[in-house]
């Protein structure tokens, strides 16, 4: 897969970073450098995640982050890197690729999620604990972990049946399915909030997130023109 162009990059994209740039960033953040795993993170070939800039952070630099596993204190590391530090950019791995780390008690749900995604041409991707367990092999998953998924939709008309299907799967699943639906314009909304808005009688605002910031997504804007879906 080719690298993702800068203009098409999204929150949750995974970045491989040059070792010398990583060392330089940690030299400027010694407290983070002392956290478990962080100093040798990129030398192990592990990616960092693209995140939104915090207030007052330099927008000319790339904002990246990584969470540490529960056994290492659940610290969240946030750093700024020059664009030339990025060696490669990839979308998060698919649920199909990461299914091997799903614990046996939850594994029977994976085929249902994949089949449901195929019905609407949506390949669910993994984020959260499942993502990090998959890419690092470290013990991020616990019995209390949610199953965090991204559902990138190509057409507005797919959003409503997608939300209904996720809600049905959640009703039949003993653990929590979390995550976001990524709208065609790249803005992402929490699927539960979108579902609540979709089933409400009025026009409810949902917080949409992208690298550019946050904005309100109205229920009416989730339907294509002329659609009653």
Image: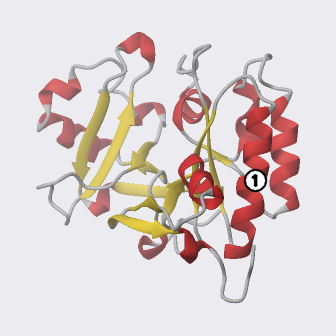
Task: List the single residue furthest toward the front.
Answer: 201
Query: Does residue 172 show up?
Result: yes
Choose between 106 and 140: the one closer to the eye: 106
Q: Quadrant of residue 41?
A: top left
Choose between 217 and 147: the one closer to the eye: 217
In the displayed structure, does residue 185 sit left or right of residue 82? right
In the displayed structure, does residue 125 sit left or right of residue 161? left
Task: List the single residue furthest toward the top.
Answer: 71
In the displayed structure, does residue 135 sit left or right of residue 226? left
Q: How is the image coloured?
A: secondary structure
> Residue under circle 1?
164
Q: Secondary structure at mark 1?
A: helix
Work out which quarter of the rendered image holds the N terminus and state it.
Answer: bottom right
In the displayed structure, does residue 40 sit left or right of residue 153? left
Establish if 179 lies above or below 162: above
Establish if 226 lies above or below 165: below
Residue 121 in the image, given as x and y percentages of width and height: 81, 64
Residue 83 in the image, given as x and y percentages of width and height: 29, 62
Query: Does residue 123 show up?
Result: no
Q: Residue at x 48, y 36 (%)?
A: 46
Q: Residue at x 76, y 53 (%)?
A: 164
Q: Residue at x 79, y 16 (%)?
A: 105
Work out which quarter of the rendered image holds the C terminus and state it.
Answer: bottom right
Q: Quadrant of residue 78?
A: top left
Q: Quadrant of residue 104?
A: top right
Q: How many marks?
A: 1
Dot 1, how many residues are within 10 Å of its Cα: few (below 14), some (14-19), or many (20+)?
A: some
Choose between 81 and 63: the one closer to the eye: 63
Residue 110 in the image, given as x and y percentages of width and height: 81, 35
Establish if 116 lies above or below 225: above
Q: Residue at x 46, y 68 (%)?
A: 217
Choose between 21 and 73: the one closer to the eye: 73
């Amino acid at each position: 897969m080719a690298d993702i162009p800068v203009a098409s990059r999204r929150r949750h994209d995974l970045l491989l970073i040059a070792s010398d740039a990583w060392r330089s960033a940690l030299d400027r953040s010694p407290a983070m450098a002392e956290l478990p795993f962080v100093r040798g993170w990129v030398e192990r070939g592990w990616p960092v995640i693209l995140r939104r800039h915090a207030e007052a952070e330099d927008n000319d630099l790339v904002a990246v982050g990584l969470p540490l596993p529960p056994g290492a204190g659940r610290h969240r590391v946030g750093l700024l890197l020059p664009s030339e530090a990025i060696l490669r950019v990839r979308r998060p791995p698919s649920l199909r690729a990461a299914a091997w780390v799903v614990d046996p008690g939850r594994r029977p749900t994976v085929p249902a999620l994949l089949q449901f995604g195929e019905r609407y041409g949506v390949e669910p991707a993994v984020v959260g604990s499942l993502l990090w367990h998959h890419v690092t092999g470290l013990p991020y998953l616990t019995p209390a972990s949610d199953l965090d998924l991204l559902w990138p939709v190509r057409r507005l008309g797919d959003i409503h049946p997608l939300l209904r299907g996720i809600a049905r799967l959640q009703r039949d699943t003993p653990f929590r399915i979390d995550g976001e639906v990524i709208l065609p314009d790249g803005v992402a909304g929490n699927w539960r909030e979108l579902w609540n808005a979709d089933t409400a009688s009025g026009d409810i605002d949902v917080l949409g997130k992208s690298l550019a910031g946050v904005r309100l997504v109205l229920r009416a804007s989730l339907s294509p023109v002329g659609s009653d879906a």
